Structure formats: structure tokens, C-alpha cells
Amino acid sequence: MFAARNLWIAAVLTPLALVVGERAAHAAEPWDLNPTAHRWVDRFGRVVQDVCPTVDGQARCQMHWIVQPSANVTAGSGALGADGLAAAYGLTSSVPASGGAIVATVLAHGNSTALVDVNAYRTNYGLPTIADCGAALPTSGQFPPCLAVINQTGGFTNLPADDPGWASESSLDIEMISAACPDCSIVVVEATDESNQNLNAGVNEAATIPGVVAINNSYSGPEQPGDGANTAYTHPGILITASAADQDYEDEGYNNPPSPIAPGYPAIDAHVLGIGGTILKQLQGGVRPYAEQVWNVGVQTTAMGPEATGTGSGCSSQFAQPTWQKNIPQVCSMRAGNDVSAAADYINALGSSTGIALYCTACGGAGATGHFTSVFGTSASSPFIAGFFARLKLATTIGSDLGWVYRNGQSFHDVTVGSNDSASTDCGSILCTADCGWDGPTGVGTPSAADLLNAEADAGTSPNAPCTPVCPNGKCGGSSSGSSSGSSSGGGSGSGSGSGGGSSSGSSSGSVGDDSGSGSDASMPPGDDASADAAVEGGGGDGGANNATGKSSGCGCYAVSSDSAANGALFVLSVAGLVLVSRRRKQR
């Protein structure tokens, strides 16, 4: 009994000791606006720092810094860079350039090292440098492309002062746009602060830039009454993208009661393409050597209580259901989020949870030199999508008709594994659970350049045909079989099974990080490799090396397996967090 008690104490205190140790080692870190509340350990065992801690009533950037084990990483450390993004989403040399499209990104505060950072990133990944536009805006078709920085009223002077968190976000946005569209010119619009009023002004200013085809917004706050009347994000003919938020389904992961439980805004705006996040897992070989699942890093214990981090989604209370969502499963009578998705986090082929590569100077504080580090969040997926559609010359088309992505849903990679409902038990539908065709966390899926280049506006009437993904509680006709397993020193475990309206078989084994688990992988969508998704899911954990055989056929559904903890200690803390969140929700 004594030994068991000591084991339990060690399990609880180990992650807390990691956090405390990291705080002591990084006491002067500029992102530590409130280190007690904003540094935590995720389910992969990574020590994580929130870059833009929440201030109620204001927007927050959707980016998180991986302090350990990958702080100050070298460029070749295995984090997802421009080359990996291009490979995963088909941006090969055969994909034409944009022809000098202009993409804007709106942020709060300033970033005086934006040009230095982006060019260090571009040079590292073999992309040509981007020029300084100086005191002028870029023009459509301009070559070489240039970077312009303006304030929320369009001025080139009187720019806002630097803020370490938002400056790092700015560098991430510019680098993700560059990764997708190297020949795009970029305009950074710096709002005075993160208030909705000033960010709205920044978006309206960006829309006045001649030739701009896309405007990215890597920030979010819970949807509030009155948002439905806001016209700042209504600019027909310009693609406006926004991060779905990083606090799980309907922002339930955030633990401060004054914040409303609602989907992230502006991503849920009916005039905005809402961008969800995935965990991109590199596999060993295969037709497409990548698999994806809903991005969710679990429930963490913080000084402010349990907090969950994963892609946002949800059902609006302010925006009516758009006509282009009439053919998705009717689990929401209003506008449902999200529309498409892309990588928000990354597991490399060695099984290391390395995140997204970022070169930034602000990460090191005042007077520091720039360096590579690792981050994750939908702040990476949204600017990448803006650049991606600009590169494919689809931004204006989609900006004029968001329904285009739904009619061409078959041209996206369908993400069918995972959930973002770890902080509550009240969703119970595809609003929070990945499935065949459209689902809340990942929308119609992640982009495939080759397929989208060949897409036709009238290619179909629904992203769900021929699948019918409405599967309450994982109950569908048909059958499926498959298995996966992973192992490590961790003590967490999970399992799940399901049945579907098709048939599939496959197995995988291996491990990723400290995750472990076993279970059965249920029926997969047509053409997917059952073993690939099993490798990501880990049959209850989060993956393993791809070591499997088997293909799937038909269309079916599955019950999502429970996520294992990164290790026994995190499992204990996660359970405690779920209990606390559950109690909070009952008191609401």
C-alpha cells in the first residue's frame, strides 16, 4: 500500500514539477504574462506556454509555444516546415504560382522584426526572399513579391508598439502564408490592440487594399450577442479566413466562467471561411504518407483550473444557416463551424510530437536574436489556408461563394478520426466528432492541391455523397474490423470500437511519444488506409509507427475511442480536470 501511495503521489506531482521547473528556468520569458496560469503540460508530455493569454471581452491569438522538449529548436529538428506542408497538401513544383496575388493578415500590436523573421524562414526552406514594400502597398502581379506593414487606418508610420505574443503570431502568419504561396505579396495590418473594435477596423482597412484576394485572421473569442450584425467580415469577392479557436467544442476548454460557452468568432461568421485544425502525422510510405485526425491535446491542470486545448467548432446562435450548409447533416439549425481545416500540430515520422516550425525574434525577448522554435494551434492552419487558396487562384471564387468548398468537398482529404469534446459530454454529434464527409472539427477536410485544381464548381451537391455520416452513438448498419496498438512507458490507456455501413480491415502497431493504448479501429471512409488512421489514433492512444496492412471499402461510421494520457501522471490530472469541468458545467 505504501508503494502504491508513493506511485500515486509521483504520478500527480511529476507534471507539476515539470511546470514549476520550467517556470524557474524561463522566469524572464516574455510570454510569461502570467506564468502560473499560462504554462502547462499537454498529453504528449510537452511543456506548453500560451502565447496570447485570454483577456475577457477581447480576441486572443490561437497559438501556443512548445517550451520543452523543442524550445529553440534547430531548423532540422523535425518540426513541420514549409517543405512538409507542401508535401502533405500537394503543393509540388507542378502546381502553378499565384501570379503575384496579395494576401493580408490582420493582427493586434506590432512586430518590428517581421521581415527579418520571414526571410530567415523562407531561406531555410529554399524559398526566395520577400522584398520590403517600403512605404507603399504591393500591386497585383508584382514580382518579386513584397511585404508591407500598415496600421489599422492604412498608415505606414505610427505603427503599434511590439507585443511579444502578438509579434510571434504575426511572424507565424506571414511564414504560413509564405509556405503556401511563395510568390504572394503580403500586407500585415496591425490593429492598435486586441479589442474587437480595432480588429474590425483592421479588417475593413485590409479590404480596401487594391487587388487583395484573401484576408486572414488568426484570432478568436467566443461568439457574443450582436456579432450577427457586425459587417466587418462581409466583403464579397475577398476570401476571409479565421482560426476556429483552440479551446475545444464551443470554447468549452477555457476555464474562466465569465467567458461565454459559444463557438469562436469570427470563424463562425457566415461570411468567413472557418478553419479548423488537425494533427498531421507523417507515416512511413504509402500513397499519401500522411494521416490526420482532429487536433486535440487534452485537458490540462493549470493554476486557474482544468483547461482543454484543441480545435474549436460549434453551432452559432447569431448567424442563420447559410444555404450552402443545407446539405450537411442537420445537427445545427444555425450556421455550423468549421468549413475546412489544415495542420495545427505535427507528429513526425520518428513519432515525435514536434509541432509547427516558427522563426521569430520576439520569442526571445527584448534584444534577442531570431531563432527557430515550435508552436501549435489553429493560428497556423488559418493563414496557410488563405495562402493555399491564393496560390491556386481560388480565393476570389471562394470569397464570392463559400459554398464552393461544399460543392467540391470530394476534392479535400476527409478527416474521420478524433473529437474536440474532451471538456464536456453534451455534444454527442458530428459537431464535435470527426466522421465521413463534413464534420464540425475539420469541415469538409484538408486541402489537396491536385484535386482542387481539377475541381469544378458543379462537381456535386453535397460533401457527404455517397456517405451518410449521421451515426448517433456510433450505431450504423454494416460491419468493420481492424485493430491498432501502441506502447510506451506511459500508464494511460484507451479503447474504442464501432461499426459502419461498409467494411474495412487493418491493423497497426507502434508508439508515439509516451502514448499507449489498444482498441479496435472502426470502419474507414472509401479509399482510406485503415492502418493509416489507426496509426494516428493508436487505438486509444495517439499513434504508432505505420506497421500494418489492410484497406477499407464502403462507407461507415465509428465510435471514437477515448484518448489515452501521455503518461500515468497526466492521465490522473486529466481525469481530475474533466470532473472539475463537468461540475462547472452543471452549475451553469
Image: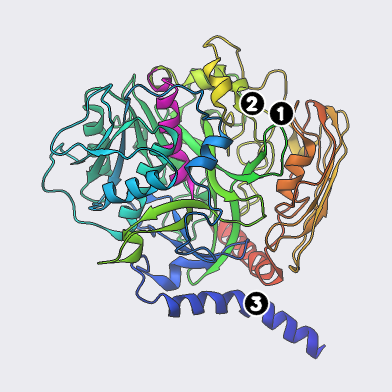
Where is residue 503 drawn, in percent x and y? 86, 29
Left or right: 565 in relation to 82: right
The answer to which of 277 and 349 lies nearer the viewer is 349
Q: Compared with residue 393, is residue 531 higher up or lower down, i.e. above or below? A: below
Can you identify the residue that label 3 sits on? Answer: 12
Q: CA–CA distance between discs 2 and 1?
A: 8 Å
The answer to which of 78 and 253 lies nearer the viewer is 78
- Residue at point 13%, 38% (across, down): 135
* Residue sitting farthest toward the top: 458
Where is residue 357 drawn, in percent x and y? 47, 51
Q: Compared with residue 236, is residue 246 higher up or lower down, i.e. above or below? A: below
- Comparing marks 2 and 1, which lies closer to the viewer? 1
- Residue at point 72%, 59% (across, down): 564
Q: Compared with residue 121, is residue 457 higher up or lower down, i.e. above or below? A: above
The answer to which of 454 and 413 lies nearer the viewer is 454
Which stretch appears magenta?
Answer: 377-396
Q: Are marks 2 and 1 in contact (CB under 8 Å)?
A: yes
Q: Which one is earlier in the sequence, the residue at label 3 or at label 1?
A: 3
Where is residue 47 drawn, in percent x and y? 53, 67
Crowd around label 2: few <14 · some 14–19 · many ≥20 (10 Å): some
What amino acid is labelled 1 in the image? Pro
The answer to which of 483 and 310 lies nearer the viewer is 483
**Which numbered marker is on residue 329?**
2
Q: Are marks 3 and 2 in contact (CB under 8 Å)?
A: no
- Residue at point 44%, 58% (across, down): 373
Q: Secondary structure at mark 1?
A: loop
For the N terminus, give its image quadrant.
Answer: bottom right
What amino acid is labelled 2 in the image? Pro
Can you identify the residue that label 1 sits on? Answer: 469
* Main SS category, magenta section: helix
- Residue 220 in magenta stretch: no
Whether residue 266 appears in this view of the structure is no
